[in-house]
Each structure stands twice: as C-alpha cells, then as structure tokens.
Image: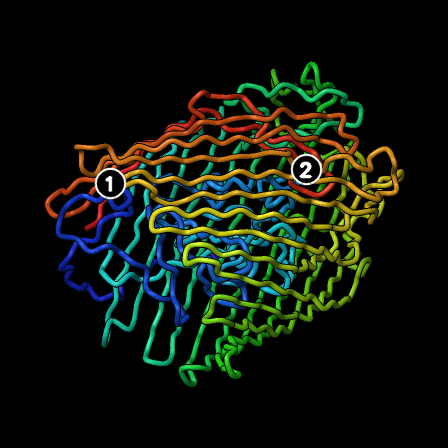
Amino acid sequence: MKIKTLACMVAALPCCVPALAQTTVPPASGAGQGGVVSMDAITVEASADASAGGLAEPFAGGQVARGGRIGLLGTQDIMDTPFSITSYTNELIQDRQARSVGDVLQNDAGVRVARGFGNFQESYFIRGFILGSDDVAYNGLYSLLPRQYIATELFERVEVLRGASTFLTGAAPGGGGIGGVINLVPKRAPNEPLTRVTTGVSSGGQFQLSTDIARRFGPGDSTGIRFNAAQRSGDTGIDDEHSRTSLVSLGLDWRSADTRLSADIGWQENKLKRARPNVTLGPGVTTVPDAPDASSNYAQPWSYSNERDLFGTVRAEHDFSDKLTAYAAFGMRRSDEANSLGNVTLTNGSTGAGTFYRFDNTREDSVNTGELGLRGKVRTGPVGHEFVVSASFFDLKKKNAYVMDWQNTFATNIYDPVSYDKPAFSAGALRGNDLDDPALQGRTRLSSYAIGDTLSFLDDKVLLTAGIRHQRLSQRDYAYNTGKENGAYDASHNSPAAGIVVKVAPSVSLYANYIEALVAGPTAPAMAGGKPVPNVGQSLPPFVSKQKEVGVKYESDGLGAGLALFSTDKPRAMYNASNELTTSGKDRHQGAEFTLYGEPVKNVRLLGGLTWLDAEQRSTGNPSIDGNRVIGVPRFQANLGVEWDIPGVPGLAVDGRVVYTGSSYADDANTLKVPGWTRFDAGLRYMMDVDGHVLTLRARVDNIANRNYWSSVGGYPGNGYLVLGGPRTFSLSASMDF
C-alpha cells in the first residue's frame, strides 16, 4: 500500500473520536507560574504512556522536567540516577517556536547542531561526539522517526541522556551514541480535552498551520486519542530556498488497574528545493574562508532533497503484582529519499572559488525493532533492589542507488555564486544501482540481552546501580551493481556499567559512573577530501568506548544545577595515504559540564550552562597529528536563556538567549581554524482570554545581529565541511485553544 494512501487513512481517524463536551478550557503552553492568565482553567498535563510512572513532572518554570527515561531503567528522577539527563518540555518547544529537534537543542550548552555528510540530515555533537538523527530514539526504540529531519509536532519532550549508554539503551544502529543519546517522548491525550489550532509565518514568507486534538473517553477516561497534523511551506530567509514539511500522527493509549497499552502511527514528508549545501574544503585549501552573507545561497537552482517516512509503534506493560511488571514494544519505519545535489568544494579559501558536480541519490529504508523486559522490586534484609532484565532487537534494510559525476565539475564561488542549468550526466559518471529502483546495499541487525539492579541503602540515601548488556552486531554490505556481499562482520561484546548516587542532603546528590559505548564501525563513503575512497562500502569493526564520570546535582524549590566531569576514550577512523578508511588510534574527550535551570525568582526563569571540552587525537600512527584537537569540537561553548514575566501585564513574557561556540578546526592537522561565534535570540509571548478560550501570540527573532558565521564544522567522522549559519529570522505565530 502506498504511503500516501496510508497517510490519508490516518488523517481520517479523528472522525471516529466522540465529540465530547468541553467543560473547561486548558491554557496553552505558556509562561511559568507567574505568567499564566488568570481565568477558570485547568493546566494540561500529558497522561501516562504505557508505563506506570508516566511523564516526569515539570520542574519549576516548566522548561525542563524533574526526570526522564534512563534506558532500560525506565523513568528516573534526576536526583536518583548516576547519569546526566535533561528533559525539555513541550512548553519550551512551543514558546521557542522550535520546528525540529535541532531547534530544541539550541537551548543545551552540551549539544551543538551539525549536518550529515553530503545531505541535509540533522546531526548533533554531544560531548564532542556525533549522533545522527537516524540514531534518535522514539519512546526508547531507535531509528523509528524520519531519518533526516524530525518535526516537533511528532513528540512531547526531548530527553538528552549524556554520555556513553550501551548498557542503558543498547548500541545505536548508525554508529552514534558515544557522547550521549536523544529520546523523543510521544504525545498522549491529556486529562482534559484539547483542541488547539496554530498558525504562523516566518522570514521569507513561510507559512505554518497545525492542529492538535486530544480526547479521553470510556470508563474512568481509560482511553485516550491524540491527533496532530501540520504543514509548513514557503520560502525561507535564505535566498531562493524553499521547504515544505507535511505530517500527520495519531497516538492512542488505554489503561486499566494493571495493564497499560499505547500505539502511534505517523507520516511525514519533507521537501527541500535549492537548500543551501555544505562547503567542503578541498585538498589545496590553506585558509578557512570568511563566512558569506547569511542570506546568500550557493545551491544550484535544480537541486532538491525529498524524504517521506511512515512509522508506527505499539507498547504494552502489565503488572503481575505491585512488585513485578512486564513490558514489550515493537516499532517499524518505511522511508523513501531522493536527492539531486551540487555540493560545493572550495578550491581557494581567500577568494571563495570552488567547484561542484552533480550527485543524485535514492534510498529506501525498512526498519523493524522491539524490546521486552521484566522489572521488579525485592528486599534482602536492609537492602532494597529494583531489578530489570530485558532483550531487544533491531533490523535495518537499506536500499541505495547513486550517480556521481565527480569528474564533470563546474566553477562557482560562495561569495558570487554561478547558476547552471541542470547538467546531463557524462559518460564517465560513477553509477551504483538504478536510481528508479535502488537495490539492497546494506543490512544491520542488532540483538542484546541485559540485566541490571539498583540497590538502595541507608533509607535510600545511597543508590548503587550495576548491570551488563550482551550486545551482538551483525552488518552486511552489498556491492553496487552486482549485489555481491563485499563487507560483513559479526561481533559481540559485553558492555558493563556501574554507578552510585549519594544523597548528602535532600537537595544535593553526588554521583559517579563507569559505562561503555559500543557502536558499529563506520562505513567508507564513496568520496572523501574530494577523492574516491577505494574501499567504498566497507565497514570497520565495532568500536568500544569507555567513559568515567563524576558529578554533583542540586535541586531546590526553584533552582536546579549540575556539574559533571567526564573522560571518554573512542577508537578513531582516518583516511590513509591511499584515501582508504581505516582504524587508527583513538580520540580522548574529557571535560566539564555545568547546567542551570528553573525559576529562582518568581516570574524569572533560567535555562543554560557551560561546557569545556578537551577533545584530543591520540596514538593515531601519525606523529604530526597526535595531540591535536578533534575536528569540529570547540574547547568552550555556553548558553544562557532568561525569560521574564512583565510586571503589571498578566500573560506577557519576554525571553532572551545567547549562544556561544568557540573556535574549532576543520582538519586533523589543525591548520584550518574556524572562528567561534556568538548569537543572540529573543522572543515575546502574550496570552489572553478570548470568549473563554486561550489565545497565545508569539513573536521571535533569531540571530538578532544578523551575524555571518560558520555554525558547524563537520558532522561525519573525519570530515571538516562547513555549514553556514542562518540569517536574522523573524517568526510570528498564534495558537487558540477551543
């Protein structure tokens, strides 16, 4: 059945929802405690998913939650876990007018948003390690949501679990997860009826229209249904760039005294026309170019990138007793992608001269994944135990095809772009499979078994967590055109973890952990550094990374803070003299993270932090780069967001945010230094009562100073391509709750 047909079926489902009378009007997500309009209203609270604990409660100020999902350990309070996590709420997502996961993570000082290799996939530097968006988890299961871009209408919260996490979450199928993982929490029907319509416009004339409808019904409101639909379409603030994102999603849940069920189905289509591409520094470039005008566009007029995804999940949890619970989940994704690109390779850093060639690609993904487990509580004398055993599997089949006309180049310039009609492929173009019918190019299978126990001592003032996961990775790569297997490995590893929390006071927890990350080795791309890679398609053996971390957490009634010191060693890949991708040496990332959040003073909310990173290349086999910094990782980055409810004007709030990223390098030799940057953003929100309904008006401007800057360096291991930051961007929106 075609994806569009399924999408239409999903869109029709809300017609089956009973038209229940709405006796109260829930306020839109808005200001903190001091910024809510005074009216007869009930705060919208998301109901529990298929878990006994449900969502962690929001912390003071409403921008982050008191806890989040710690992998197989389930939802944990921040103060009770020996791991570092931040859970960003839907209130923050709406108030910052975030459109994607990356927009939400602009608020996190430990994360920087980058872009995938040669495409427009969102990637994220966490503790200096890359996590691709296809390694993002949805309700605990990897790689279910769209692979390149995930719209915010598809999730309730963004949970960032910092640090290695194989014991907790299993190996990330795409090779990420060393510096942390991201879990997106699905939307569920709140306890009160919700009907919300949002419309908006942003720079370039891009319009937005979305709806969010939720009802609970049945005995005791045991059944919930939540429907979301949205479309954003139009030009952006970048010259001649156009994007259109369409989506529908449906979330269902049911609960009884001892059983909880939930399910999701969703569809998203993301289309980009003339999207501004990455800039690769060619082999002879010795100078990093100054950033061009932030509004300029050096994409070719015929370039495009399309992605279409259909996904679904089911989850169940059953209590055999008040001390023993079983759970199970399954998910799937089916995706289609097509691109025609003309990415720029710079040949002169001073003048901005460069070249491009046409590269077309099609891809189809088929993902099936699931988990099951058992959680229990027992006591052995004075010691309490919360144990868990679990098993998981993941299966990805990817079909791919490409035509790369890498010898047929065209001259251009990032400061004075030259446009061409779409060139026909030359006779010398490299071809892999059929663009109209891509063939199987790779298969990844992961399976694991895990057991863990959290022991509590001294009236729960000391918590000791220990466990181990046996992870098996199997990967097969198939040659283009022939389908012959040309790269494979089967490997397994036991990944242990141990952590301790000591509550020295009700508001202070000390913690420490040791944990590992196991990721599939990277696969050699077709091109690197502007030259073909001889072992294209070959996958390197799995990498084992080891992390040690200590820290302190503080939470009072209105203020939360954390300090973490960590060190992680990761095997590294590099290109040898023949431009083959090989394993050589390791990277050591050590640093300190400080986080700050909450509402320390009534009507004033803070969200921010500082991160210091020493990411160093070690034992690479090349003395000239040993001790150098890792590509794309700054030494220092910081965020600070402040939101203030204006006195005397109920419902009016203003916010400001500063984002600082230090300098980094675009090459292993550390000769190509990319300047750091600072960006200022601001927003205004006003909530009012309109005939008993809440209307929320929001205005925002990002990059107030219209700064020209390279927003990220790299985003794929061993590559230092540049991504230009966006221009000053205005956004206006209005949300009405009916």
Viewed as shown, does residue 422 lie left or right of 318? right
Residue bearing mark 1: 696
Q: What residue type is labelled 2?
A: Phe
Q: Where is residue 183 in the image (x, y as percent from the top left)?
A: 50, 56
> If you read the primary sequence from the N terminus, does the residue marked by circle 2 or circle 1 appear first?
2
Quarter location, residue 297: top right
Q: Name the residue under label 2.
A: 359
Toward the viewer: 282 or 453? 453
Observer able to see residue 2: no
In the image: residue 573, left or right of residue 104: right
Judge left or right: residue 149 versus residue 657: right
The answer to whether residue 607 is above or below residue 476 is above
Question: How far apart are the two marked residues, 2 and 1, measured between alpha carbons?
Answer: 44 Å
Q: Looking at the picture, how far across and down is residue 311, in whole percent?
A: 49, 60
Residue drawn 82% across and 49% down? 583
In percent of width and height, residue 154 lies at 42, 53
Displayed quadrant of residue 702: top left
**Position in image of residue 197 (x %, y %):** 26, 47
- Which mark identifies residue 454? none
Q: How crowded is mark 1: few (under 14 residues within 10 Å), some or many (20 or more)?
A: many
